[in-house]
Image (cartoon, coloured by chain):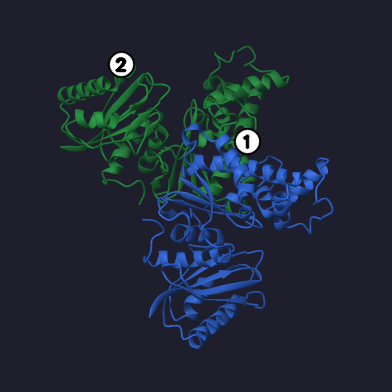
Chain colours: A green, B blue
Amino acid sequence: MTQVVLAIDLGGTSADFAFIDFAGEILYKENIPSTDFDTANSFVQLTKKRAEKAIATKKLDINVRAIGIGAPNGNYYRGTIEFAPNLNWKGIIPIADYFKMAFGGTPCFLTNDANAAAIGEGMFGNAQNVKDFIMITLGTGVGSGIVINNELIYGNDGFAGELGHVIVKDDGRKCGCGRNGCLETYASVTGIKRTIIKLLMDNKFESELKGVSFEQLSGKMIEQAALNGDALALEAYNYTGNILGKALANFVAFSSPNLIVLFGGLAQSGDLILNPTKAAMENNLLKIYNGKVPIILSGLKGNNAAILGAAALAWKEMGVKKMAV
Amino acid sequence: MTQVVLAIDLGGTSADFAFIDFAGEILYKENIPSTDFDTANSFVQLTKKRAEKAIATKKLDINVRAIGIGAPNGNYYRGTIEFAPNLNWKGIIPIADYFKMAFGGTPCFLTNDANAAAIGEGMFGNAQNVKDFIMITLGTGVGSGIVINNELIYGNDGFAGELGHVIVKDDGRKCGCGRNGCLETYASVTGIKRTIIKLLMDNKFESELKGVSFEQLSGKMIEQAALNGDALALEAYNYTGNILGKALANFVAFSSPNLIVLFGGLAQSGDLILNPTKAAMENNLLKIYNGKVPIILSGLKGNNAAILGAAALAWKEMGVKKMAV
């Protein structure tokens, strides 16, 4: 009988659940809808039904030790999802309690998706045995998880590590949070799209992206253009990396990590974003930190990163496996 | 026999040493020079001589359990002072080892002055029983100590918490560290002096400070002018508080503290700096943090704050007293 956790990666339109062992091996994974439910509890009931069915039909010889959930606006301390704009369920949802009840008292742990990714990186990815690191998720928005002394930090109320909402420019771009100049308005996939259109308006670039609307534009298209040598796309990566690198230099002065890990859609463009980011960070670091903080890409495979993070959370909370030793 | 630690606050021109019990009671304190020594070890030997003399002449019935040192550029992990610009001793000085040897193997702990102040605040000041707080020292420069989960964070190499060197303005004021726009170029005593002169040059203020040179100008003079209703001085506090408050809003997004403590020369002007700082921080906070992070002044009395910090470090490391419970 294999010891596993039930890991859940909850997104706005669908969710993954999976049985994962302590080595990060995914024994079974399934995608289920998350939008079709009026209440969070009915989603929990479906997950339960599907999980039990999987165990029966696949003849999985497993013992589910705990449940780990990564969710947008997840609050670790309370096991709640709070005012998530992309979910159907409004207000404060005690979803960890729902899961615990549905699964006969199995311990259930929850954190937000960026924190889960950081724990996953520390347990199964490129930050294994790294005591102090910062993981930055460059997706539709920008999220972060901060590890200090082998512990993810949650802060006073569970909301530590909102580095996507550090203000990097006075009177900068309007952000979804209602303020201006947040890092995520520049260093996310949406941010680099905004940069492409802005650069097009400000300059006289000849570019294959000239005829594309903001809505049509995707991170992949920008990446492909840059790989084709498109000057506009390359400049957009430089502009983005410059802002991100400066922000990272300030983050280093806070917790003095020895590693920064980038993850998410924008990070997948690799050196295109890594190189200008590294250069800008080094140029803006206080001398004592120069050359000490590598920036690398996540070691978690794109499709499974979130679910591995949720599993890592559960294993960590059960005390079975540490993030680093 | 009273259990004490020997606390040392090492500065550029002089040092204090004191015997302090675990309640923060100062049994004896003495000021000695720190400049007149070619080597750090000769300073250590003088400290030993004076400490022994004090015990004999004052008939102190004490048992020295440990030694705690707060020093500029102090490295906690290594017990060294590293390249301190304001001290005579160049390079890397293993001063904790020197003290330990001089005092017959008594355990000796060292950290930088801003970190020591934060530990002191947590043990004896206004941050007692506060799990997550940030202490900012607004003196000649700007230092900081960051407490997360009741622990001061040191980071990978002992240099975490250099918040005075977070860059708050692109192409901002030249900083002693060689870069531009660091927080300490604005939010220190030196910073507000620069602001006074800048505002005088940019505007047509009628001010009692008009005839004062940068060199003559002091924090106290600016404070007195503001208390007299001087428009220039008041504007300088607003300008400074605005920059400091915005920076604090970004720091909150990092560690989500439930308290920020201000300390040092500029903080002593009280509401003059507190009010604009609070307003700017609240205006720039991500909504989830609004109204949750008080900014207060240090509860450590000015003259003894650094030495109490050094004592707190030693008690903490000995496991006798925790910063918070």
Q: Is residue A218 above or below residue A309?
A: above
Q: Nearer the viewer, residue A280 or B198?
A: B198
Instruction: Say which residue label 1 marks.
Output: A242
Q: CA distance from mark 1 to mark 2?
A: 43 Å
Quadrant that contains the N terminus of chain B: bottom left
Q: Residues within 10 Å of mark 2 (few under 14, many from 20)?
A: few
User: Is label 1 in a helix, a strand or a loop?
Assistant: helix
Residue at position x 83%, y 50% in the image = B210
Nearer-N-terminus badge (1/2): 2
Mark identifier at residue B7: none
- Extreme-bottom residue of the structure: B57
Instruction: Kindly tell me whether residue A111 is visible in this rendering.
Output: yes
Q: Is residue B300 above or below residue A120?
A: below
Instruction: Say which residue label 2 marks.
Output: A38
User: Is label 2 in a helix, a strand or a loop?
Assistant: loop
**Residue B65 x, y percent position in the rendering:** 41, 75
Disc 2: host chain: A
Q: Nearer the viewer, mark 1 or mark 2?
A: 2
Disc 1: host chain: A
Residue A30 occupies which quadrant of the picture?
Answer: top left
**Residue B132 x, y percent position in the rendering:** 44, 49
Q: Is residue B27 above or below residue A247?
A: below
**Amino acid type assigned to the residue bearing label 1 in the image:** Asn
